[in-house]
Amino acid sequence: MRKEKNAGFSLIEVIVSIVILALLMLPALNCYISAAKVNTQSRIRQKATNLGQNLIEAIKNSSNEDILMQFNGVKEFSLIQNNLIGYPDAYQMKAFADGGYGEYINTGGAYVRTIPGDGQSSIIISGMPSVYRYAPPIGRSTYYLGIEGISEGDKEFDAFITIDATPYRDSMKYPDTMNNYNMPQLTELHQKGVTVLDLEGFTTTWSDDTESAVYDNSRSTDQQAIEYFVNLQEAYQAYLESLLSLGLPSPVPVAKYSLEQIKEAIQKDIQISVQRLSGSTSVMITCKIEYTCHLDVNHDGSEEKVTYELYEETYSISNGGDHDCLIYIFYTPSGLVLKDILNIRNNGTNTKLVLVKQSGTGSANLSIRKDEQNMAITSLYTNLSTGELDTASLSCITDYHMISRQSPKDRIYRMKVEIFEAGAISIGDFSNCYASFHLTKENEE
């Protein structure tokens, strides 16, 4: 800068200097302002994240019915504690046809029994507090829940919760699993002396632990038996060929049976033994499956058999009830042509045996045979129909109604918790989501 007789800077020089300084400082100032805004947004999102995580933990520890009762004002609202502004404005919401959301009810601080049409309540004892249960309409599988005015530090938020069972109703993706499974209703599994025999589960597994897993029955006992008899025939044919190749005398060549011929000649015999151990209060329960092929596949002059030992365990019997031993058998009808057989051998223990038919493609009828000794009593309960048993077996059944099969129900839900700026629910603006959480939850009843 040029100085004139040491009289300082001219006005123009000062203005130019200020402009230059401003130009130099402007980027730094912009960075500072941007950083401040980012920090502010980060703090808001961190608070929203903390709030969402707290909600997720509360949801995981509650049944769906308990959550819905809280939103209906029947139970004390406890999903969020001590950080709501005033009374919690908690809504159950439903989707309108136009895609918007509307309130079912705003409690406004007043307790209500249930949402009209969405639940039932009843007074068990006259004059006593009401006992409530939540009974949603048939077919209801998705719930939308909203909470307004949640205070997290110095910031307010709205929370929007979606409970949705429909992703796990896909019968193509989840056949006979998830929310499509007809769950057997069993009784008395809590008692002592209980044995559970999962005949398929002994030798079958899930292919992996992902959602796309399939039930792998390639090593089921049915499949193993078929392979055994086929391999027995192949081994005999190979033996004949080896004799011919060596020029040695050999039996007259015989025709090979086809795979279907072998399968049609196989019979499955499930054998359950209840053996009271001499001089003790214990009983040994064993389970094995014997397969007989009514063809002489290796031409040794006899039918072929193969046996698979599945289970053997000793239990202390449970005295004092109407039975000393309780056995559950999970049975899937085989895909074989001949009737399946269930042989029950009991040498002296009062036993309740529950035969639970599982879903499957097999259609073989079942023949039941009981061999009881020493005053043994074997009561047999099943969900098999009379048409699935041969005539001689009908007298073996004590009751067909102890087991019921529920229609498919929603057990697995996809949960989503979204945190928005306060006021989002009241105006229906869900465009600015601070935090979103997803989880899969089993409904605990």
Image: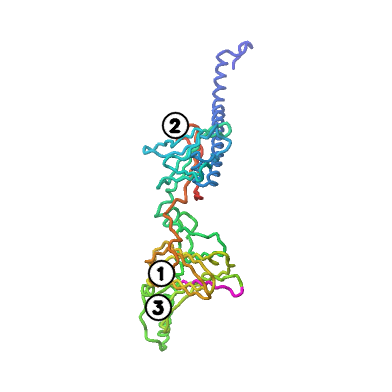
Label 1 Cα crowd, 10 Å radius (few <14 / some 14-19 / many 20+): some
The secondary structure type at the circle numbered 2 is: helix
Q: Nearer the viewer, residue 367 or 182?
A: 367
Q: Which mark is residue 278?
A: none
State the image coordinates of residue 155 (x, y, percent, origin top left).
55, 32
Give the left or right position of residue 298, taking residue 18 as reference.
Answer: left
- Of the image marks 2 and 3, the number of the one nearer the N terminus: 3
| Stretch in magenta | 270-279
* Residue 272 is covered by the magenta coloring: yes
Select label 1 or label 2 by which is in front. 1
Which residue corresponds to mark 3? 294
Select label 1 or label 3 by which is in front. 1
Mark-to-mark CA distance, 1 and 3: 26 Å
Give the left or right position of residue 347, taking residue 241 as reference.
Answer: right
Residue in the image at 55% along x and 14% along y: 12
Label 3 Cα crowd, 10 Å radius (few <14 / some 14-19 / many 20+): some
Residue in the image at 36% along x and 72% along y: 260
In the orientation shown, which residue stands out farthest toward the bottom? 249
State the image coordinates of residue 47 (x, y, percent, origin top left).
56, 36
Which residue corresponds to mark 1? 394
Label 2 Cα crowd, 10 Å radius (few <14 / some 14-19 / many 20+): few
Residue in the image at 46% along x and 69% along y: 221
In the orientation shown, which residue stands out farthest toward the front? 126
* Residue 119 is covered by the magenta coloring: no
Which residue corresponds to mark 2? 427
Res. 54 image quadrant? top right
Q: Nearer the viewer, residue 10 or 219?
A: 219
**Dot 3 amino acid type:** His
**Dot 1 amino acid type:** Leu
Mark-to-mark CA distance, 2 and 3: 76 Å
Residue in the image at 61% along x and 74% along y: 279
**Dot 2 amino acid type:** Ile
